[in-house]
Structure formats: structure tokens, C-alpha cells
Image: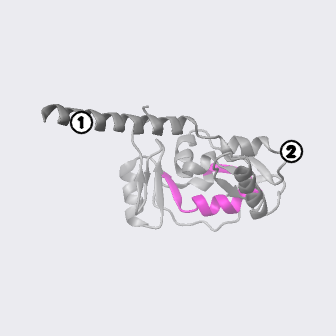
């Protein structure tokens, strides 16, 4: 009976290790869908470029802006919904994986601007600065960036972030170190691997 129990325990451990191995292999085999879209310019119209390459961020604010963008930092910007649809179809047809797409305003506007150009100035708690004031982007992306980052402010530290969210629950606060606090979620920690 004791040997059978040891055999069952060994089989459970083996099954757990096989499942872990399979999960790690899936992670390693993840497809670079964003890279596939960026490389498919000969077959796909409306791809503007990598969001991270299109944004200019004020020096010193890079970590905070990256945290505020979250997974959108790795997104591909496309001109409009038709381009997004075509990009998704290409990914499916080529079995190239999944990608996050930031959809532009429907045209490639010349030049660039800060995301808050022309927006009314909101009253912010002392020491808080809108993320949008720290980013310059192509004009076609500004509406999407405004929807994504319009209620995110940069603060010095977590205590200031907690105060901002308590005083203005519609805002999210991101620290210069990249920790994020919002009314219903938070993300952060060390930068170690």
C-alpha cells in the first residue's frame, strides 16, 4: 500500500512537471504578431508603426509613461478600424499570433502634437502632472492616446498616488518608478527579474 501511494505521488509530481514544461514551451513559442504586422507593409495598408517608436516622451518620464501605457506600449498603431480589421485578418490567415492595435483617427495627419493640445486644463491635485503632457505623438494617434491616458497622472511616490486617487477617484496615478494606483486596480513592485 505504501509503494502504491509513493507511485501515485510520483505520478502526480510527474504530471505537474509535464504541465509546467508545456506551459513554458508555449511561452517560448509565442509568436511575434506585432513584428509580423510591421513586416507586412507590402501586404497591409494603414499600419502606422510601433506605438513605442511613434511616441516621444519627456526625459525622466519614460518609466511612468510605460507603466501608464501598460500593454499598449507594445501595440501597433493603425490608421483606422479598416486597417485594424485587415491586420487581424492577416494575423489569422498567417497564424501569426495576437497583437494589440491602437486605432488612429482615420487619417495620417501631418506633424505631431502633444496629446493635450486644445484640451481644457483640468484641475489636478498639487504635484500631479497629466501623463498626456509628457508625451508627443503623431496627430492621428492623439484621440486614442487621450482615451487611453486622459485620466492618468504622474506623481512622485505611492503616498502621493493614494492621495490623488482618494481625492479624485476618476484618476489613476502612476509614480515615476512605474507603480500604478487606481480606484479599482493597482500594479507595481520591484524592477528585478
Residue 153 belongs to the span the image colors magenta: yes
Left or right: residue 110 versus residue 168 is: right
- Cα distance in 3D space between marks 1 and 2: 55 Å
Residue sticking out furthest to the right: 42
Q: Is 141 situated left or right of 21 in this image?
A: right
Residue 64 percent across, percent down from the top left? 52, 45
Q: Residues within 10 Å of mark 1 (few under 14, many from 20)?
A: few
In this figure, which residue is indicated by the disc labeled 2?
A: 42
Q: Is residue 111 left or right of residue 28?
A: right
Name the foreground residue: 173 vs 189: 189
Q: Which mark is residue 81?
A: none
Of 192 and 34, the residue lying toward us: 34
Circles 1 and 2: CB atoms closer than 8 Å:
no
Q: Specify the segment rendered in magenta.
A: 134-154
* The image quarter in which residue 11 lies: top left
**What x and y, as percent, mark residue 93?**
74, 51
Quadrant of the image containing the N terminus: top left
First reached walking from the N terminus: tag 1 or tag 2 = 1
Task: Determine whether, in the image, residue 138 is placed left or right of residue 126.
Answer: right
Q: Tell me if residue 162 is in the magenta stretch.
A: no
**Residue 9, numbered label:** 1
Q: Which colour style is shown?
A: one colour
Q: Is residue 167 visible?
A: yes
The reply to whether residue 137 is in sight is no
Query: Tag 2: Cα neighbours inside 10 Å, few (<14), some, or many (≥20)?
Result: few
Based on the displayed image, in which of its 4 quarters is residue 86 positioned?
A: bottom right
Q: Quadrant of the C terminus?
A: top left
Q: Mark 1 vs mark 2: give the one in front.
A: 1
Residue ID at (53%, 51%): 68
Amino acid at each position: 500500500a505504501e509503494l502504491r501511494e509513493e507511485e501515485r505521488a510520483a505520478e502526480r509530481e510527474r504530471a505537474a512537471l509535464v504541465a509546467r514544461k508545456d506551459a513554458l514551451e508555449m511561452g517560448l513559442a509565442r509568436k511575434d504578431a506585432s513584428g509580423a504586422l510591421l513586416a507586412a507593409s507590402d501586404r497591409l495598408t494603414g499600419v502606422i508603426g510601433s506605438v513605442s517608436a511613434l511616441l516621444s516622451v519627456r526625459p525622466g518620464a519614460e518609466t511612468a509613461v510605460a507603466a501608464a501605457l501598460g500593454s499598449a506600449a507594445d501595440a501597433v498603431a493603425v490608421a483606422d478600424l479598416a486597417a485594424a480589421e485587415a491586420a487581424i485578418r492577416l494575423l489569422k490567415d498567417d497564424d501569426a499570433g495576437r497583437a494589440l492595435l491602437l486605432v488612429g483617427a482615420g487619417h495620417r495627419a501631418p506633424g505631431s502634437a502633444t496629446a493635450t493640445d486644445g484640451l481644457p486644463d483640468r484641475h489636478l491635485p498639487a504635484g500631479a502632472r497629466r501623463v498626456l503632457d509628457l508625451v508627443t505623438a503623431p496627430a492621428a494617434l492623439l484621440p486614442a492616446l487621450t482615451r487611453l491616458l486622459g485620466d492618468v497622472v504622474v506623481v512622485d511616490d505611492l503616498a502621493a498616488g493614494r492621495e490623488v486617487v482618494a481625492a479624485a477617484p476618476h484618476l489613476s496615478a502612476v509614480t515615476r518608478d512605474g507603480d500604478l494606483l487606481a480606484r479599482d486596480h493597482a500594479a507595481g513592485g520591484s524592477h528585478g527579474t
